[in-house]
Amino acid sequence: MTERLSPDPAGLARAAALLRAGRLVAFGTETVYGLGADATNADAVAAVFAAKDRPRFNPLISHYPDAAAAFADGLAGPAAHALAAAFWPGPLTLVLPRRTDCRVTLLAGAGLDTLALRVPAHEGARALLRAVGRPVAAPSANRSGRVSPTTAAHVLDGLDGRIAAVLDSGPSVVGVESTVLDLSGPRPRLLRPGGVTLEALAACLAALGIEVAADAAASESRAADAAAPRAPGQLASHYAPSLPVRLNATSVAADEALLSFGPPLHGAGAAFALSPAGDPAEAAARLFAGLRALDALGQARGLRRIAAMPVPEAGLGRAINDRLRRAAAPR
């Protein structure tokens, strides 16, 4: 049975002790819940792959309490320091070259010469990381390819009995995973849109005279990323509910569940409003909960799929659409 811990000093101490002992502990961040393991312990990291049924070639993000701790394992240049100053703590992951004395096991990085690093904004998560005293590898706390969890209950839905504990930190406020930016090459490359927008990243790096490769510029390497990802969340089929997902719905049938954005369509067999006002931040925070709710309702009512209304491809909408496209991809 998986322990459900409170985010008080006793719960944090228990969670840290379990992690240091090589056990798996899920914990809340501002993005989604992560499934934590001691990133310096290859056996613990291997247990993450087993618990999630995760492909071994898919790398994990290592989490740190501050930028100084992160840059002790990843080699940071001017761009990394500027981005860390602007967006850490926060929903941004940087992919950097591994230092020669990097503490993180190669398995956590899928054997690559790079490392994905993040300093979360959630104070409870950083308190846990300080208590552990080691980098914590933490992908989303769900079965691989399924809908990411934004509450402790979501974690237990998929992983109860497969992990030691979940630290119940309440609902995640951002609701989509971190933005992943690769700084290991000659030009920064957006690998995954997320809680920090492309526009904000570009504005920060423009002060250094640096441009970000994104969208069409980055598409040339997406096939290679899908075959051998340099960061999490790049597999073509990901974040998927059991029901198939239909994108850009402008009408909805009685045998479909509707994921609405803005004024809803009428006639659905079930519906979940991401944001009646059309606010991308509210929609991002509710996205994974909405997919989970419609999946359960749709299966209970015998519906055939989820119809997702269009979301503008800008700001956080880019991250929402990325998750929806992967949820709708062939499996």
Image (spheres, grey):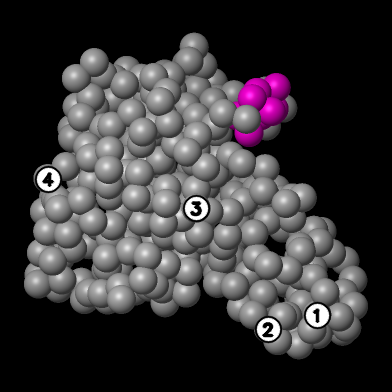
Local crowd size for mark 2, using a 10 Å CA cut-off: few (<14), some (14–19), many (≥20):
some
What's the distance in space between the residues labelled 1 and 3, CA to CA? 27 Å
Which residue corresponds to mark 1? Answer: 303
- Above or below residue 209? Residue 90 is below
Q: Residue at x 54, y 32 (%)?
A: 229
| Residue 297 image label | 2
Q: Quadrant of residue 199?
A: top right
Q: Is residue 228 magenta?
A: no
Q: Residue at x 22, y 37 (%)?
A: 40
Counting residues from the start of the chain, the first of labels 3 and 2 encountered is 3
Foreground disc of the pair 3, 4:
3
The amino acid type, in three-letter code, at marker 4 is Gly
The reply to whether discs 3 and 2 touch (Cβ–Cβ < 8 Å) is no
Does 64 sit left or right of 267 as displayed?
Answer: left
- Above or below residue 271? Residue 310 is above
Q: Secondary structure at mark 4?
A: loop
Which residue corresponds to mark 3? Answer: 53
